[in-house]
Amino acid sequence: MISPPSSLPSSASGTLVAIGGAEDKTSDLEILRRVFSLAPAGNHEVAVIATASSIPDQVLPEYEAAFSRLGASRVHSLEIRDRQQAADTDTVRLIEQSGVIFFSGGDQLRLTNVLGGSRVLTAIRERLDDGAVVAGTSAGAAAMPGTMIYNGAAADALRKGAVNMTFGLGLVDGLIIDSHFLERGRFTRLMEVGASNPEHLGVGLGEDAGVIIHPHGILEAIGPGHVILIDSRDLASSNIADLSVGEPVAVEHMILHAMVSGHGFDVEARRYLVPHELTALLAEKR
């Protein structure tokens, strides 16, 4: 079931993990290790979905090796290249029995085009509701929300209409997620999104960085990189509604936070959480 606008998974839901791309898959596996640790007790099966990737033959063996190293009992490598495969009964069964479901990077439009409205996506949503962990990297992270970015120049995106948006996978709402955020200079992409959608929290994920989206709307940064938040809910003013497409956008009072591993954010309260506050709040919400 898709969450209503501006909501996050309920207390009955599993856990989402969005990763900014280029995560370590061969050394310490810091982020993937954390993803695997969130799996439901007793379920060590992992389904890796490479639908977004143009090179699944290279991507799938890397994740199979990484999750096997972490202790996965089975790793199901799922290319799912077309909508017929997204309706396949055997593929759905493999997802239904997995404790971790992982989306690779690539092209988020390919991901939504192939999976949108499919039996596979329904099964993923049901697994999330039942307590599984659903994670995605790069395009797999950007596609998670109900609304996703799929294009837009990084250099000067603070112009009306510079960022293209469409429906995502509907696993979480109230967030807009962008990946490779620092490395590709994508600040103005989320600023333009914030100016036109102030209710949504912009989440910019650096490479080898991720965010756990806990039930109750608590975010937790993980990995050695940065997670950038752009909060426009209390935007004082903007000229975006009066502009023609391509004209520069003005914004007043857009708030930016930079999180590192162990820091967090309460989405509903719009409150930054230092490590001891995050630990206490997560314990309280359990």
Image (spheres, rainbow, N blue to C red):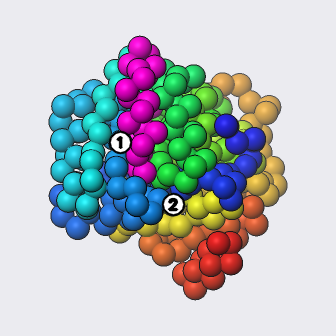
| Residue wearing tag 2 | 212
| Residue wearing tag 1 | 47
| Residue 258 seen from this side | no
Left-right relation of 140 to 268: left
Residue drawn at point x = 52 percent, y = 34 percent: 123
Q: In this view, does 273 lie above or below 196?
A: below
Residue drawn at point x = 35 percent, y = 55 percent: 44
The count of marks equals 2
* Quarter of the figure with the N terminus: top right
Q: How far apart are marks 2 and 1 (CA)?
A: 18 Å
Nearer-the-camera pick, 199 or 29:
29
**Is residue 209 in the magenta section?**
no
Q: How crowded is mark 1: few (under 14 residues within 10 Å), some or many (20 or more)?
A: many
- Measured from the top left, where is residue 52 in percent x and y? 37, 30
Q: Which region shows up in magenta?
A: 83-110
Residue drawn at point x = 68 percent, y = 59 percent: 11
Nearer-the-camera pick, 117 or 206:
117
- Measured from the top left, where is residue 78 in percent x and y? 31, 32
Asked which secondary structure carries label 1, the reply is strand
Instruction: Kindly report which numbered mark, 2 or 1, lies closer to the viewer in this rendering.
Output: 1
- Measured from the top left, where is residue 259 in percent x and y? 51, 69
Left-right relation of 250 to 125: right
The amino acid type, in three-letter code, at marker 1 is: Ala
